[in-house]
Image (cartoon, rainbow, N blue to C red):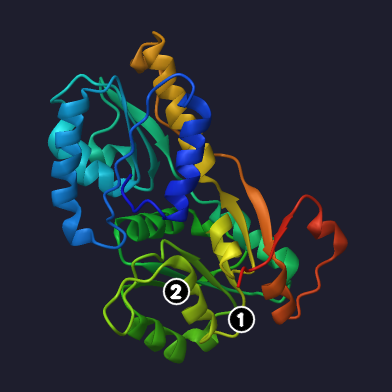
Amino acid sequence: MSYEQDNPWCKEIKEGIDRVMAESAELTYFYMDTKVDIQGGEEKAKQAHALYETLNPDGIITVDDNAQSMFVVPFLKDKVSTPIFFCGVNNDASAYGYPNQHISGTLERGHIRESIAFLKQLLSEVENICFVVRSSPSGRAIKAQVESEQSTYIVPIEYFELLTNTSEIDDFTSSKGNHCNAIYVDSLEGIIDINGKPMVNRQVIDYLRARFNGPVIGGNSYHVEDGAVSAVAKTGQEQGEIAAGMLLKVLNGTPLKNLPVTRNYKGRRYINVNSMKELGIQPRPIVLRGVTLVTTPK
């Protein structure tokens, strides 16, 4: 895992992996903690490699981009024959030289277009969207996705901000916030607060919502649980299930070359009831059909 053990995305992916493989394999998890300590990633990658050599596993699942760039590419790619399946990867697979004879997996692609369209159903007066993501490999990959598909969005993009700390959030909301009808957030964990400490997702969303009066939406269920109004969410469970399913097929004899790189497709609609009421949003009943309603825990 690229990130820390209590990261909500990692928890979702672990659920998916466990669901597929827990009954048929002994599973060992290693966390690189790069959301909260990117500088320590290289040392964590060395530790992961030492664990690999100790365990000599039959297969590996590597999660999110930092695990690819810091661990797989320098230590394992084309150096071992162990089958490796990645998931949660925002970048193009070709950026890491994937696929090859022992590596394949599933890409993570947010349902950004669908999330914006869903907000438009909830709040028809939204005429543009701004993006706030952390400046990181995942954040830059999200920006690349947005740039490649923005012509298909129901409303235009006003600004796309790659931020690293709360001072930059302050600057953005004070100088540009009034020009944003809504803000889409993703990959927020690790933004630095005024004391130099990395923040978790809910802290960043709370900080942003305290300075922006319009709707904040996201791309994951935990964004909505942490206060975003809505999302058409990709799920870590789907990512984990796909990667684990591919690995299980290889362990049962399917040639890896028969398992090409794929991507997630399932989306679930979420609404935060508290945030919707705070903004005075009163959606038509038909819009709520099939939606998962959540409240922000205190």
Q: Identify the element where label 1 is drawn.
A: loop
- Residue occupied by mark 2: 204
Q: Which mark is residue 214?
A: 1
Where residue 142 sits: x, y (%)? 41, 57
Q: Which mark is residue 134?
A: none
Residue at position x 63%, y 75% in the image: 127
Quadrant in the picture for residue 258: top left
Residue 123 higher or lower than 210, as above or below: above
Q: Earlier in the sequence, mark 2 or mark 1?
A: 2
Residue 77 shows in the view: no
Residue 206 higher or lower than 22, as above or below: below
Of the two numbered discs 2 and 1 in the rendering, the one whose residue sits closer to the viewer: 2
Residue 196 higher or lower than 99, as above or below: below
Q: Identify the element where label 2 is drawn.
A: helix
Q: Residues within 10 Å of mark 1 (few under 14, many from 20)?
A: some
- Disc 2 from disc 1: Cα separation: 16 Å
* Amino acid at dot 1: Gly
Residue at position x 68%, y 66% in the image: 295
- Side of 201 where 64 appears, left or right: left
Residue at position x 49%, y 67% in the image: 185
Residue 226 shows in the view: yes
Where residue 86 sits: x, y (%)? 35, 35
* Amino acid at dot 2: Val
